[in-house]
Structures are given as structure tokens and as C-alpha cells.
Amino acid sequence: MIKDTNRLETQLGYRFKNKAFLDEALTHSSVGETYNNERLEYLGDAVLELTISEYLFHLGQMNEGKMTRLRASIVCSESLSRAANAIHLGDYLAMGKGEDVTGGRKRRSNLENAFEAVIGAVFLDSDFPTAKAVTLNLLRGNIALALDGKLVNDYKTKLQEQIQQHGESVIEYVLESASGPEHDKTFRVSLWINHRRETEGEGKTKKEAEQHAARAYLIEKV
């Protein structure tokens, strides 16, 4: 069972009716293979994407490309881990001793995943409007920074802008491998442009690996 979460729920602006959802969202995969936050992370990622997409859509007459770039910067690993740090989410995580002593509570991938899982848990415990309100409240500062172009180094967006200056191009990120134990996987992703393999990137999440692959291309090719 996770430590007392009253303060966390206050920071979320939401009180769980079924605490089991929050307990699961705060359980790292190093605790066990069958009970952890990975399924809720998957769900929360979808809630985040839709929430930010809808929010940007209603801001005004931005074109698709700008909305896509802004959304990518708001839901990227650096942004979500920053939001998780702001509410000290790492302090509440249940994790194996090995993960804990090697800095797991501050690891960006763990914070990003837990943040997404918590949003998924809010959605299951309530409904989409409530999960959307919680999400926008937690990401309000990051959204403002993104709109001012001051949030994060989004290499995928920079790559897309660079490539499209030279005409239409097909950009794809392909998962090559996922190695290591369930609680500490390393993902390797390859970047393909116009069906040609260009660079690779590694990271503790697929999103992070994609960013590294894009960064490698910008450094080596542009």
C-alpha cells in the first residue's frame, strides 16, 4: 500500500473515490510484473493527448502543424517529468529497493510514466471532463511556456521543421528493440526519412529514444 496520499490528492485537486486506482498508478514495475502502473500509463497517455489536442484546437486558428508541434512539446518526457516533480510525485512511488537506491524516484522516465498513470487513474475513477480539468491544472505552467516557445528542446519538432523546408517528407520512428528487465527497459528506435534509415536513439521510454534519434540526425546531417 502506498504511503498517505492526502497531500498529493490536494495538489492534484482531486479526491479518489476508489483509492485502488491511485495505488496502482503509484506502483512502479520493479515491485511486480503483474501489478504496476504500466496499463494506467497507457490509458493516461491517450487522455493527455486528447486533452491537449482539444485545448489547442479551441485556442484559435492555429494550423495543424503548429498544434502538432505545441502538443509534442507539452506531452514530451521533459515536460511531464517537470510537472511530476512540481507535485513531488516521486516521493509517493512504491518501487523495488534496487530501483530506489539507484535514483528511481528522480528518474525522468519513472516520473513521466507515473504522471501519465495518475491521469489514467483519475479518468477511471471519474470521467473525461474531470481528468481533463486535472490535466490542464497540472500542466498550466508548461502550456504557457510552450505557447511562448520556452518550454523544452523538442528535437522531433525541430527535425520536422528542418525537413519540411525542403518539401514534403515522410518521417517515421521505428522501434528496433526493448531490452532489460520490465522495470528498467532500454528502448532503441531508428529514424527513417523518405523510407531511408538515418539514425538511432536510445532511451528509457520510446518517446525519449525518438527524441535522441531526432537529435542525432540534427547533429550529424543538418
Image: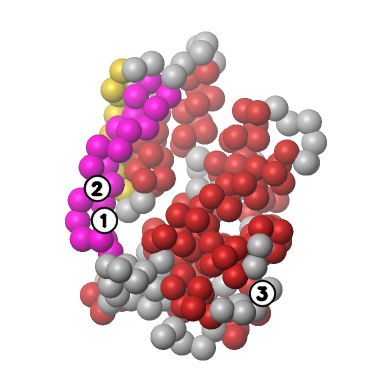
Asked if the residues shown at circle 1 and circle 2 are in contact, with their CB atoms under 8 angstroms apart, the answer is: yes
**Magenta-span inclusion, residue 3:** no
Q: Does any portion of residue 216 appear in the rendered image? A: no
Q: Is residue 10 above or below residue 187?
A: below
Q: CA distance from mark 3 to mark 2?
A: 35 Å
In the rendered structure, find residue 185 and report the number of the disc placed on it: 1
**Along the viewing direction, whichever of 20 and 29 lies nearer the viewer:** 20
Q: Residue at x 32, y 33 (%)?
A: 174
Q: How is the image coloured?
A: secondary structure
Asked if the residues shown at circle 3 and circle 2 are in contact, with their CB atoms under 8 angstroms apart, the answer is: no
Q: Which region is colored magenta?
A: 171-193
Identify the amino acid type marked 3: Tyr
Q: Secondary structure at mark 2?
A: strand
Q: Does any portion of residue 154 appear in the rendered image? A: yes
Dot 2 crowding, Cα within 10 Å, few <14, some 14–19, many 20+: some
Residue 122: image location, x then y, percent? 59, 67
In the rendered structure, find residue 14 and report the number of the disc placed on it: 3
Q: Between label 3 and label 1, give the one nearer the viewer.
A: 3
- Which image quarter: residue 68? top right
Q: CA distance from mark 1 to mark 2?
A: 6 Å
Magenta residues, dominant SS class: strand
Identify the amino acid type marked 2: Ala
Q: Residue at x 51, y 75 (%)?
A: 22
Residue to which mark 2 is pinned: 178
